[in-house]
Amino acid sequence: MTIAVLLKQVPDTTARITISGGVVDEAAVGKWSMSPYDEYALEYALQLKESGGADLIAITCGPARASKILTDAAAVGADSLIHVLTEDSGMDSSNVQSLLAAAIGRVGADVVLCGKQAADTNAGSTGPGVASILGFTCVGMVSEVSTDADGFIAMRMGPSGNEKVSVSKPCLFAFDKGSMEMRRPNVRGIMMAKKKAVETLTPSDLGVSLIDSRVSLESHSAPAEKPPGQKFEGASSVPTVVSKLRDEANVI
Amino acid sequence: MPYDALDFYDVDSLLTEEERMVRDMVRDFVDNEVLPKIEHACRDGVFPDEWREELGNMGVLGAPLKGYGCPGLSYAAYGVICRELERGDSGLRSFASVQGSLAMYPIWDFGSEEQKNHYLPKMASGEWIGCFGLTEPDYGSNPGDMITRAEDMGDHYLLNGAKMWITNGTIAQVAVVWAKLDGVIRGFIVEKDDEGFSAPEMKGKHSLKASVTSELVFQDCKIPKDRILPGVKGLRGPFSCLNNARYGISWGAIGAAQACFDSAREYALSRIQFEHPIASYQLVQNKLSWMLREITKAQLLAFHLSQKKDAGTWIPEHISLAKMNNVDIALEIARVARDIHGANGILDEYPVMRHMANLESVKTYEGTHDIHNLILGRHITGIQAFTRSLE
């Protein structure tokens, strides 16, 4: 069995985001990390590999800096690393999906794990899009996955509780917050990761002709500032506070 | 707020990617498994056993040693590990220093092939804890006059004497003990269950409360002949261990200082007095910028020393300078950080008072601040000032 895990490098959730010229200034991002939902996908990909003796291939698509998360994946146990090198950060989701699908096809993976959405764009289209191109079954909002005799058992969060579903290959699992956090690497893994080569592929290496983006970014804007806090003193303010809590904050 | 490690000159960019990955691994461990438990561990006066286990799992024990199941990392990586551990707590870093530099290192450097194969893999994995017995109740800065004696009884050695201030003593399976055999200092490997050996814990510390500190008592303690370290005689044995541990401390102290700075900056920005954050007042800014200045200098000192350690171009006096300076500034930074926190600084809700109390020990152990000055004084003048004949 060959498992692919799709990883995206995003600004760390603690990084300060600045907007310059109407778009997020990537050069000003101090720290880049693996997207948190992808970490869950990677953890469960490692568990599948360990339970079934599979080959685990970590794939990312992005600029040169993104290969760092592949080394991080190797440190916890990914067997081989593929970096689809694209310098155009404005590329839309359908191009990214085509590139990732081509990379998955190239390595012959029949099980794919990824995060349900990336922490930077929150688009949520990669998993379903890649599954659609490859003709794989897509299971979303997954919190756990394990193998069974016929294929896989996935736990997913349904609208009214947890759902346990059975899926057969080929398939793609898009992870919500998983039940287990991604494992911490160890020194042995880190030293092995240093030796593991990253295979870098361009769109033409993959035989993908990029199309004009059908969705293009108009601008980014910061979220609205929170209104300042209000302060009330003395017993006489109680009715005002109660009415504000009831009618404005909707908490009582 | 997530930890924001002060690195004003971006000194960590000089590390290799592998060293930075090791940093991130240890930092994650400290964030998720040490800091949530440290105050309880201090109140209870225990070193949580799961920390031992995870240090072994991460593979950081005996970091710069190669072979025999040891990690084989650079001295720079070892320094970074110490720094990140001590950002959590000096007691945690002490555990790792003693295990790696004081117990594993002498076996690795001076032990027989059989001793290395027997002890090192289990100590690197954290399965066995080690301790180091040099200091005695009456011989601290002056270990050369130690009282503990070994006697050759033909088919075994007999050990008599007592050691004090021994980190990990009570919880250790393996003790590397220095004792005089026919007047010459030799290293002996003592095991927990050896006849005539006991390791009572010392209680009542106001410092390093999450670290186990013990006495080692030898009363006609029988040691098999194959437990002497064959490769070294004299003070060079223990001193070479101390050089490595002191090197780690020079990095570790930076971690404690960074933790105090981080907390002081956060507190100063959020604490309002006279209608403004105290961070907006010149006196507080002066304190913060002094901390930044001293931490940055300490980082550059430690980094350059790491390169000399890895290149083999260091001398012990280089380590004395770094240990002395970096602990000195870390302690002063902890005190100033406590001051910035005002009364809140004495609470265990903030890490500053704990670091401050820990650093008082760190200033004293592994060569006191003053002894390191004397080591440098001897280096500068060629005249030793440790002792003299009194008229």
Image (cartoon, coloured by chain):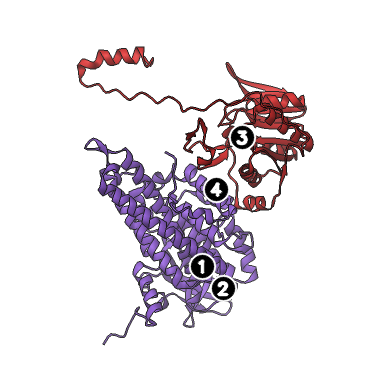
Chain colours: A red, B purple
Do badges 1 and 3 share one subunit? no
Q: Amino acid at mark 3?
A: Ser
Q: CA distance from mark 4 to mark 1?
A: 29 Å
| Residue at horizontal 37 percent and vertical 73 percent from the top | B139
**Which part of the image, by quadrant, shows the N terminus of chain B?**
top left
Q: Position of residue B311 (x, y in %)?
A: 56, 68
Q: Chain of mark 2?
A: B
Do marks 4 and 3 share a subunit? no
Disc 1 element:
strand
Q: Residue tagged by mark 4?
A: B25
Residue denoted by label 3: A89
Earlier-in-chain disc, 4 versus 1: 4
Residue at screen point 61% across, 34% down: A89
Q: From the viewer's side, name the closer residue of A35 and B49.
A: A35
* Image depth: mark 4 or mark 1 in front: 4
CA separation in Å, label 1 and label 3: 58 Å
Which mark, residue A155?
A: none
Task: Check chain identity for marks 4 and 2: say if they share one.
Answer: yes
Q: Amino acid at mark 4?
A: Met
Q: Nearer the viewer, mark 4 or mark 3?
A: 3
Residue beneath the point at 64% across and 50% down: A189
Could you say where residue A51 lies in the image, as x and y percent from the top left? 71, 38
Q: Where does the image place residue A52, in percent across and percent down from the top left?
A: 74, 37
For residue B176, which numbered disc appears in the image? 1
Q: Residue furthest front?
A: A21
Badge 2 and badge 3 in a common chain: no
**Please, what secondary structure does the residue beneath circle 4 have?**
helix
**Mark 2 — residue?**
B229
Q: Mark 2 touching mark 1, by CB under 8 A?
A: yes
